[in-house]
Image (tube, rainbow, N blue to C red):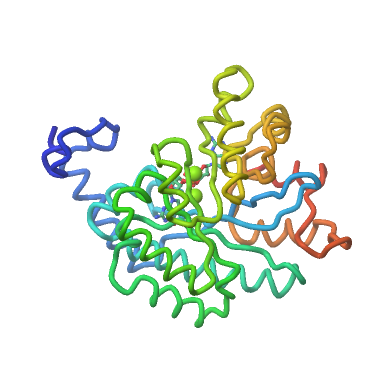
Amino acid sequence: MYEAKKKKSGYEVFSPDMSFHPIKRLQLETDLHRAIQEGEFRVYYQPLVELAPNRISEVEALVRWEHPEHGLLYPAEFLSQAEETGLILEIDRFVLREASRQVREWQERHVSELPLMLSVNLSTKHFRSPNMVEEISQTLKETGLDPRTLKLEITESFAIEDVELTESILRKLKGQGITLVIDDFGTGYASLFNLKRLSVDCLKIDRSFTENLGHDPETKAVVRTIIEFARALGLRVTGEGIETAEQLAQLRELGCTWGQGYYFAHPLPGAAVSMLFAEAPADDSSGSGIRLDEQNRANSSKP
Ligand code: C2E
Ligand code: MG
Ligand code: MG
């Protein structure tokens, strides 16, 4: 009720962190401030794989918090409060800078012709902040990352919140050569018309679909439709949350050409991804990525 009143939305779906005691919330906020100042955030990278042959052509940057008392914290434990307090802006800026620097280094060291792409998640607050596009361009200049190798992920629901504003921001980003991705697709009820208008480049099918693929024929029909529709609009489709060979086979059968999930690799610290790249056989045929064969897939599955 308090959340709904605060956001003037009329209703809000309960999530466990809303039940946080006010003192705990205050503590978290204080901790978040300290974490930014002390540099306690880390960037983990999860490979995205171009299917058949399986090649790592991209990594998604995912934030983690190395809390001095509580250990490694995941976004679910702090992101909503970081959003509420606006501290998410600092976190997003840090992730973009650090990930751009790291991926630029990998591009130089490992992948030649068609370079490794970087995907970064953008919060609503960040996306709507003034000068966001200029700020991102500046970070790319400073880190040396080619804008054509950056993808920005926004969730479906927020992409359609204010289509006109989103459209104008997206147009500016595209003008810089940056690619746009709709994350968690299938959960936010975007209309086909809006997606076309927003000229996004890629959809990521939400994990909840992948999870139910094997045992629910209706889910399969929905995923088939999403893939066909994406193809008609010229969008690339990535299946999220692939955990089993069976889910991978199903997605492939439905025409999905990109995948991400624990089956291939967990999100890993930069050093672990460097090792994965160093161990992976180079792909001589096209130079367009790092092959992920059975051997290094198994090694990379450890978080
Ligand atoms: P997302 O962008 O949809 O990222 C994918 C999430 O799914 C990640 O959770 C990843 O660890 C998890 N995942 C990947 N493969 C599998 C799988 O096979 N099975 C299961 N069960 N999960 C899988 P994570 O890292 O906890 O991030 C959660 C969300 O937090 C992200 O969802 C994204 O929306 C947000 N987030 C993460 N990093 C950032 C950031 O730097 N900035 C912003 N604004 N949001 C971020
Ligand atoms: Mg994402
Ligand atoms: Mg997602």
Tell me where residue 269 appears, x and y as whole percent: 58, 56
Left or right placement of residue 81 versus residue 191 in this view: left
Residue at far bottom of view: 142
Residue drawn at (22%, 56%), measured in percent from left and top? 85
Q: Quadrant of the N terminus?
A: top left
In this view of the protein, which residue sits in the foreground, 134 or 277?
A: 134
Residue drawn at (45%, 42%), measured in percent from left and top? 192
Left or right placement of residue 237 versus residue 185 in this view: right
Residue drawn at (57%, 40%), measured in percent from left and top? 229
In this view of the protein, which residue sits in the foreground, 222 or 13?
A: 222
Left or right placement of residue 298 versus residue 158 in this view: right
Tell me where residue 223 appears, x and y as whole percent: 58, 31
Residue drawn at (62%, 45%), measured in percent from left and top? 231
Q: Is residue 99 above or below residue 210?
A: below
The answer, for residue 139, to whether it is visible in the render is yes
Q: Which quadrant would residue 82 be assigned to in this image?
A: bottom left
Tell me where residue 79 appears, x and y as whole percent: 34, 49
Tell me where residue 110 appears, x and y as whole percent: 75, 68
Q: Is residue 281 above or below residue 103?
A: above
Left or right placement of residue 187 versus residue 126 in this view: right
The answer, for residue 71, to whether it is visible in the render is no
